[in-house]
Amino acid sequence: MDDEESIRTFIVTLLSKKGHRCTTAMDGAEALDKMNGDRFDAVITDIVIGKVDGLTLTKEILRRYPGLPIMIMTGYTDDYSVEEAIEAGAQEFIKKPFSITEFDLRFRKMMRDNEILKQSESKKNEMIFNLQIEPM
């Protein structure tokens, strides 16, 4: 999600060419509304997106959908930092302007890291389950 249509179009074009289905929103309220009742694999948001900033949006998305990978982007690098994005729960942070290669690498890394985390959680839960059912 980005308030600049050119950025939204760029990202949708790039991800669509790689086989991803994309939904866009102009602001945080619209994004949350579109997420209701639908399943998303990731969120990409700008920090400056209207009344609700991307950091607040990230926190709200993760409250509703824990573990959903989120990439935050910004052109306001003097006002916002990687640390703030990570503290809000984002898995990835990218500064605008960015290249196709940089965006693609960061997006794929975020998705790969999220998959590894899911597998790790699954194995952890499997081990706990196995420990609970085995007789002493």
Image (cartoon, rainbow, N blue to C red):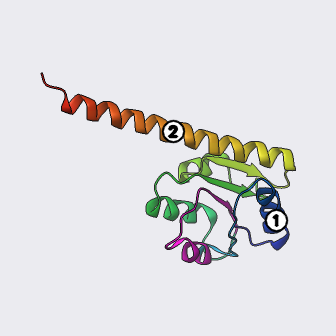
Please say whether residue 14 is one of the residues in the magenta stretch.
no
Q: Nearer the viewer, residue 12 or 1?
A: 12
Label 2 Cα neighbours within 10 Å, binned few <14 / some 14-19 / many ≥20: few
Q: How many labels does the image show?
A: 2
> Residue visible at 34% across and 34% down?
126
What quarter of the picture does the N terminus occupy?
bottom right
In front: mark 1 or mark 2?
2
On screen, residue 135 above or below 4: above
- Identity of the residue drawn at 71% across and 48% down: 107
Kind of residue indicated by mark 1: Ile
| In-front residue for pair 20/99 | 20
Q: Residue 79's quadrant in the figure?
A: bottom right
As drawn, 130 above or below 66: above
- Which dot marks residue 88? none
- Does the stretch in magenta take in 46? yes
Query: Which label was assigned to residue 7?
Result: 1
Q: Which residue is drawn at 69% across and 49% down?
A: 93
Q: What stretch is highlighted in magenta?
A: 29-48
Q: Quadrant where the C terminus lies?
A: top left
Read off the residue under disc 2: 117
104 is higher (above) or lower (below) than 50: above
- In screen coordinates, is 1 left or right of 32? right
